[in-house]
Image (cartoon, coloured by chain):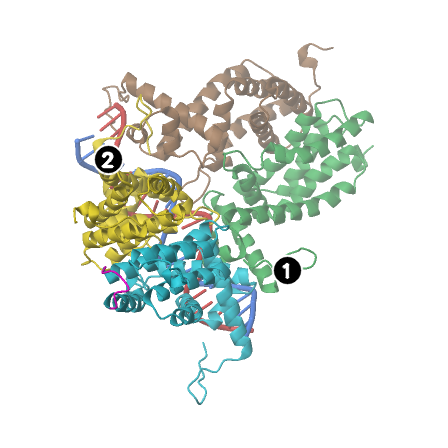
Chain colours: A yellow, B cyan, C brown, D green, E blue, F red
DNA sequence: GATGAATGAGTTTTCATTCAT
DNA sequence: TATGAATGAAAACTCATTCAT
C-alpha cells in the first residue's frame, strides 16, 4: 500500500480508502463473530464483504495488520462508550455499577463486535504460540479497578477483600455476559447487567440498594 | 478403527491400545494447553508424544474424534473430583463454596488439563461454524446451580436474585481463575478460590463466615 | 499506450513523457541491480522512483515492454561508448585491447547499469521458458570478433585458434569483470581491464607489449 | 518430516525416502535447467516428476531446503569428478589444463546439472536481496587457483600476471562454456575445453604444447 | 498394531494487469 | 497524464486424511 505521510506523520487516506477499510473491518468482525477466529480466513471475509481477496491485501499489509487494526478499532470504540459512564460516578460502588451496566448497554447494540473482540483476544498468538492478548493485556484494566476498590476500602465504603481477585472476577463476569448473549440471542442483556451490578454490590460488601433511594 | 464388541456390548480394547490412547490424549492436552487449540495439529501432537502421525489415525477416527474423547475424559475426571466435595455439603452456601474450592484444588494439580479443556470448549465448532460446546453445553451445570440457589432462596438462606445470572457468573469466575493461573504461573490458586468463595457468599446474600462456626 | 505518429512517422512524445520514461528506466535499473531481476517488481520500481504503480502501466505496455526498452536503452548507451574506442584502432590486438579497456572504463561509471543488464540478459525468458537473450543474442558480437580474429590470423598478427571459442571467452571475461566489480565494490576495474587485455593479448598469441612502444 | 536421528546424529532415511529425494532433486534440476530458477515452482517440479506438490513438502522442509540440498548434491558430484583429474597433474599448466578439460568432460554428460547449478548460483538471494552464492562463494576456488599460479610464477613456469584476475577469468571461461553448450546443444564441448586449455596456456605465458611431448 | 508415504484442499501473500476517475 | 483501486492467478506452506506395507 502507498505510504505518503502527511506533514503530521499521519497516513493520508482518501475517503474511498477509509470506506473500504471500514467495510473490510466490519466484514471481518461479522465473520469472526459468526465462524470464530480460526475459521475467518481472508477468503471468507472477502466473500462476506462481496469483494475480491486482493482488496484486503491492498488495504492492509497482511492478516496480522488487519487484526491489529480491528482490535484497536473495537477497543477504542468500547472505551469511548464506557469510560464517560464511569467517570460520571463518584463512589466506588457507583463506578462499579456504571462499568457493568455501560458494557451491558454497549453489548445490546454491538453484540458481534464484542464477540469478535473476545474471539481475537482469546486466540491470537505470536510465533511462539503465546497469547498475544493474555491476562497481561488486562493489567491496566485490573490496576484501575484495584485502585478503585482500595479507595473504597480506605473510606469504609467497601469491605476488605483481595482486590486482584475481585477485579479479575468482575471482568470475567462482564465477558461471560457477552458470551451468554451470543449463545442466547433473546437474552435481556440490560437486565443481566443490572443483576450483575447488584451481585457485585453485595460482593464488595456495600449495603445494597440504598443508592437507588430505597429506605 | 476396529470396534469388535464383546458379548456384553462393551468395546474390547487391548491393554496396549488403552495405553496408547491415554498417551495420545495426554500429549494432546499438553500441546493444546501450550500452543492453543488451533496450533495443536496432529503432527505436533504426535511429535510431542514421540510417535508417528499415523498412530493417531489408527486409534482415533479423526481429529474431531480425538478431541471428543479428550473432552469426555477431562470432563469425567473433573466431575469425579469435584462432585463428591459438593455432595458432602448440605447448605446452599456450603455447596457453592465447595464447588469453587474443589475446582481450585483441582486446578492446582491439573493446570494443563483445565487450560486445554477451556481452549477446546471455546474453539471447537461444527461444520456450520457454530460452537460445539457453547453455553448450551453448560446448561446442565447451570440448571444444577439454579436448583441449588432456588432451594436456598426458599429456605431463606439466600437473598432473592436471578439464579441464571448467578450461575453463569459463578461458572465464569471459576473459569477465569483457571485462565489467570495459566497466565501467572506463580499465582496461589487455592487462595484465589477461597477468596472467590467469600465473594460469592456475599453475593448470594448469606451472612458470611458463620458456617465456619463464627458467632 | 498512445502512439500518435507524426507526419514523419516518428512517434511524437511530449517532453514530460520522455522525462518520465527515463525516470522509470533509471529506477528499474537501480532496483534490478540491487535486488535482482526476479525481485524487481513493478511495485518496488515505482516505490523507488517515488511514483505510483499506475504510471508505469501508463508509459509502458507492460513489464516486458519496460524491460525491452531498458535493454535497448542500455545496449545503445554501451555500444555508443565502446564502438568508437574500437574503431580508432587498426590492428586486431589493438581492437581487442580497446574493446576490453573501453568496457572497463564504462563499468567504472555505470556499475549498476551493467549489473542490471546482465541480470536481465540472464533471466528474461519467453512464455515457453527459453532465454530471450541467450547466446544467440550475442551472435552479432561473436561474429564481429571472429571476423577481427580471422583478419589477424590471415595477416599473421595472431596465432591460429578457434575464433568462436576465443570470442565467447573474451565476452565472458568482460562480463565476469562486471560481476566481480559488483561483488567487490572497491575493486579497481581499470586495472582489471588492463590485466585482461594483457591476458588476451597473450592468449591470441601476439607478441605482447610491443604496441606500447616497447622494443 | 520425521527426524529420528541415528546414533551418529545422521538422519536415518529409508530406501524409499532416498529414492524419492533423488527423484525430486533430479526433477528440480531438469525443471530449473529448462525453465530457469524463477520459473521452477514447486508445482512445476512436482508435475515434471509426476507427483503431487505435497510430496515435496513431505520430503523437504521447504523450497529453500530443497535448493540447498540440490546445490550441495551437485557441488559434491562435480568436485568429486574434477578434483582427481587436477591432483593427477604436477605442473601449474598441467593442473590448469586438467581443470578446464575435466569440467568440459563433465558437462558433456551432465549438461542440465551444470546449467541448473549456474541458474541457482546466479539467482538465489537472501531476504535482503543479496546473492547467496555471490563471488564470495567462489573465494576458495579463486584462492586455490591463485596459489597454483603463484607457485608457477615462482618456479618461472608462468609469466607474471595478476593471479586474481586470471583466476576469475578462468572460472568465467569455464562457466561460459557451460552456458554456450546449453544454447547450442550440438556444440562440441570437449573441443571447446581443449581450445580453452590452449587459450589459457598462452595466457599464463607458458610455452605451449611442450607438455604434450613436442620438442 | 504401527508407520511411512502421499494427497489435495485450504491458507496467506505477492504481483502484473486493468480500469474508472 | 496520473493515480488509486481492484482483480485474479500463482506462489509456498500447512494440514487432516488415506493407504499400502
Q: Secondary structure at mark 1?
A: loop
Is A207 left or right of D84, judged from the image as shown?
left
Q: Nearer the viewer, mark 2 or mark 1?
A: 2
The chain to which mark 2 is attached is A
Q: Quadrant of residue A19?
A: top left
Q: Secondary structure at mark 2?
A: helix
Is A124 left or right of B148, judged from the image as shown?
right
Label 2 and label 1: CA atoms lie apart by 56 Å
Res. D43 in view: no
The chain to which mark 1 is attached is D
| Label 2 sits on residue | A18
| Label 1 sits on residue | D12
Crowd around label 1: few <14 · some 14–19 · many ≥20 (10 Å): some
Q: Which residues are magenta?
A: B155-161
Q: Is residue C48 above or below residue B96?
A: above
Residue A206: x %, y % from top left: 28, 48
**Residue B47 belongs to the span the image colors magenta:** no
Q: Quadrant of residue B140?
A: bottom left
Res. B104 in view: yes
Q: Nearer the viewer, residue B119 or D65?
A: B119
Q: Nearer the viewer, residue C204 or B173?
A: B173
Q: Is residue D103 above or below residue B36?
A: above
Q: Quadrant of residue C160?
A: top right
Quadrant (top left, top right, bottom left, bottom right) of the C terminus of chain C: top right
Amino acid at each position: 500500500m502507498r505510504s505518503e505521510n502527511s506533514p503530521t506523520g499521519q497516513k493520508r487516506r482518501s475517503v474511498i480508502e477509509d470506506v473500504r477499510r471500514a467495510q473490510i473491518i466490519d466484514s471481518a468482525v461479522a465473520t469472526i463473530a459468526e465462524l470464530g477466529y480460526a475459521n475467518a480466513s481472508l477468503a471468507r471475509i472477502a466473500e462476506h464483504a462481496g469483494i475480491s481477496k486482493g482488496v484486503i491485501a491492498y488495504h492492509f499489509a497482511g492478516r496480522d495488520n488487519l487484526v491489529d487494526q480491528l482490535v484497536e478499532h473495537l477497543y477504542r470504540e468500547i472505551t469511548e462508550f464506557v469510560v464517560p459512564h464511569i467517570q460520571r460516578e463518584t463512589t466506588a460502588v457507583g463506578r462499579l455499577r456504571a462499568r457493568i451496566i455501560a458494557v451491558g448497554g454497549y453489548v445490546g447494540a454491538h453484540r458481534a463486535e464484542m464477540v469478535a473482540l473476545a474471539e481475537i483476544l482469546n486466540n491470537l498468538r505470536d510465533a511462539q504460540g503465546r497469547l498475544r492478548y493474555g491476562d497481561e493485556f488486562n493489567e491496566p484494566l485490573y490496576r484501575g479497578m484495584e485502585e478503585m476498590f482500595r479507595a473504597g476500602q480506605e473510606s469504609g465504603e467497601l469491605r476488605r477483600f483481595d482486590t486482584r481477585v475481585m477485579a479479575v472476577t468482575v471482568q470475567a463476569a462482564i465477558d461471560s455476559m457477552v458470551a451468554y448473549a451470543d449463545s442466547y440471542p433473546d437474552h435481556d442483556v440490560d437486565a443481566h447487567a443490572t443483576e450483575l451490578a447488584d451481585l457485585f454490590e453485595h460482593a464488595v460488601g456495600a449495603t445494597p440498594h440504598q443508592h437507588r433511594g430505597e429506605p
